[in-house]
Amino acid sequence: MQESIKFYAFFGFNLSYHWESDNEELQIAHLKLGETFLELFCFKKHTQAPNSSKELMTDLPRLGIKHFGLKVKSIHATKQLIIDNGYSEDIEIIKGKTEVDYFFIKDPDGILLEFIQDDRGL
């Protein structure tokens, strides 16, 4: 849990609440970034995600929530910041079908996090 809290703090999220069960089987953390709220759960006894969730192209066709995205002002500056701080090395910026620039990285638990630069003015 602490590694994930530190990871999201790097992107500006602040820990606003932390709870742990008496038997230490479950932790819940609430993180905030402006009006954005992120809730993290950590179960002591957890099950691994299916193999199809390990890669974006095999995970997207599967029904369910896949990732969340954060809008950034500069996709290139964000990419460099992530590389410089050792959170990922292999980052490819893609021009999406919807005309936004984006890339994905994984958080410490393997959850996909998308960074998006949207200059469409919508």
Image: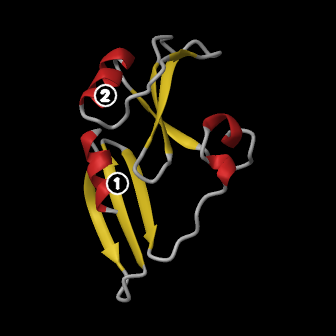
Q: Is residue 31 above or below residue 34?
A: below
Examine the image and state in which quarter residue 23 appears. bottom left
* Residue at x-position 74% and y-position 48%: 63
* Label 1: few (<14), some (14–19) or many (≥20) C-alpha neighbours in 10 Å: some
Examine the image and state in which quarter residue 67 appears. top right
Question: Is any atom of residue 65 visible in this view?
Answer: no
* Residue at x-position 70% and y-position 39%: 58
Helix, strand or loop under label 2 = helix
Q: Position of residue 18 (x, y in %)?
A: 30, 68
Q: Which residue is mark 1?
A: 4
Q: Position of residue 71 (x, y in %)?
A: 42, 27
Mark-to-mark CA distance, 2 and 1: 17 Å
Front position in the image: 33 or 96: 96
Going by the image, does 109 lie left or right of 83?
right
Q: Amino acid at mark 2?
A: Ile
Q: Quick one: label 2 or label 1, which is nearer the N terminus?
A: 1
* Residue at x-position 42% and y-position 60%: 40
Q: Which residue is mark 2?
A: 83
